[in-house]
Amino acid sequence: DEITDGFKEKTNISYELSKEAEKYMPGGVTANIKYFDPYPIFMKKGDGAYLYDADDNKYIDYLLSYGSLMLGHGHPEIINALETQMKEHGTVLFGTPHQLEIEMAKKLVNLYPSMDKIRYTNSGTEATLLAIRLSYAYTGKHKLAKFEGHYHGGYDQMLISVNPPVHEAGPESTPLSLIESKGVDPYHQEHTITLPFNNLEATAEILTKHQHELAAVILEPVQSGYIPTSEQFMTGLREITQQLGILLIFDEVKTGFRIGLGGAQSFYSVNPDLTTLGKVVGGGFPIGIVGGKEDIMMISAPSAFSDVFDNSHSSQSAAKEVLFHSGTYNGHPTILAAGMTTIAVLEQEMHHVMGKTAALKKGIHELFSRKGIPLQTVGIGSIFNIVITDQERISNYRELQTADFAWRKKLDFALLNEGIYTKPLNRCSMSTVHGDKEIALTLEAFEAALNKLT
Ligand code: PLP
């Protein structure tokens, strides 16, 4: 209560709305991540770098819809692109192939060195599911390895050891695979092997032991968007997966267009076999993308198997040859228009976002050291997190768990009261419209919050 007193005073209407929402939706939310105690804030307007809540409080937005809004809210070029798409082409959706699908594909294949061909999906979750199915089809093996603490979407197969209780999770170098949700089929626990992030020796040992069952290793090249892979780990992981005949999947749903236009693979100069993208590339609308090497991606091409399609009397024999991938909204033209515009703006302004992120991190650091509070601003590119710790190194899930989350939560509520929005305990993302003025206001807000807490 002591933490949230000021918050409750300022957010009466959000409180009322949360009670109303609870009548119709479990927990009053449409995604569990949107909930926080004592109740989430209801927003009603976004404008550039700012959000306005139901009680008319104004916030600088560092959530940016979990990093998706790289151009902030209501960017005029996105609005213009949407209008043009709908007016000139007269529809929001064709349900057929269209030219913008090719333009976006060309752009992505040029920016992401490992992608020969791509397919569109409607979310990051769908993209990782498709990438995993491709890896199973290509290798003929049916197990997946993932890293402890890495998130790849909300489906059963990935809901293993995302946020496990450390005391139940086994030894650090051989973590157990723990189920993260009620209702997950234990089949997936048996078919998903959990690896220790940034620990090459232990990872290589586990992969070698399971090489004959493992189709792929999937990872967030920057865990949760802010804990980077070490160069040595990244290079070693690429080498060992290649040697063992296991595909390497980069889940770049967070890092794509955020640590550079060409994502983590360009930053590390490492080519995965498959890549997933989402978030930023949809310009704020739902999207997912899978890209990868020609011979893997072509398993989903109906044209490559036209003989089978033409000659077969039952679709059954065609289905045996081609990997199934479909979706009513795949390659949605309105969304691709927003995505193409986002990329065009980022091609001009990406380096500003990186510079502003570095400046804000530096400012926060200076402020905390003046107050004598140990902290790290962990992250690369345009995402970072504030980790309250006196540890020198935060390089994986277990090391992160040593941080002081209770104090961080106090800080988050103090910041909400000072007009800084991020979901409590979440990371901070920056946009092209977070300028010097917003950084100065943010640092003032941090100072006011720290004065109240110390
Ligand atoms: N993969 C990563 C790395 C993510 O960060 C997310 C979402 O946060 C997903 C996959 C799932 O994407 P979506 O929420 O669009 O299904």
Image: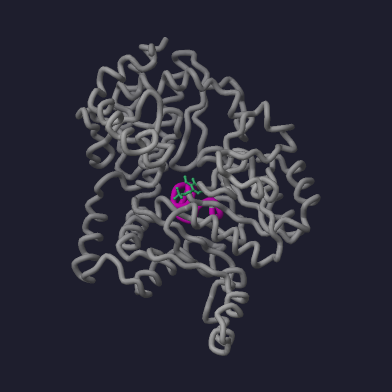
- Kindly identify the residue that appears in the image at 75 percent across and 57 percent down: 213
Question: From which residue to which does the magenta span run?
Answer: 254-266
Asked where in the image residue 307 lies, by quadrant, the reply is bottom right
Asked where in the image residue 18 lies, by quadrant, the reply is top left
- Kindly identify the residue that appears in the image at 66 percent across and 67 percent down: 138
In terms of depth relative to the viewer, which is nearer, 48 or 288?
A: 288
Could you tell me residue 420's position as x and y percent? 32, 28
Q: Residue furthest top?
A: 454
Residue 265 highlighted magenta (yes or no): yes
Could you tell me residue 114's position as x and y percent? 57, 63
- Kindly identify the residue that appears in the image at 60 percent across and 62 percent down: 133
Which image quarter holds the N terminus? top left
Q: Image check: 258 left or right of 136?
A: left
Residue 160 highlighted magenta (yes or no): no
The structure's colour scheme is one colour
Which image quarter holds the C terminus? top left
In terms of depth relative to the viewer, which is nearer, 396 or 39?
A: 39
Q: Main secondary structure of the magenta part?
A: loop
Q: How many marks?
A: 0
Could you tell me residue 374's position as x and y percent? 52, 18
Could you tell me residue 254's position as x and y percent? 48, 47
Q: Which residue lies furthest to the bottom in this view?
A: 311
Asked where in the image residue 81 lies, by quadrant, the reply is bottom left
Compared with residue 421, is residue 301 higher up or lower down, i.e. above or below? below
Compared with residue 154, is residue 396 higher up or lower down, i.e. above or below? above
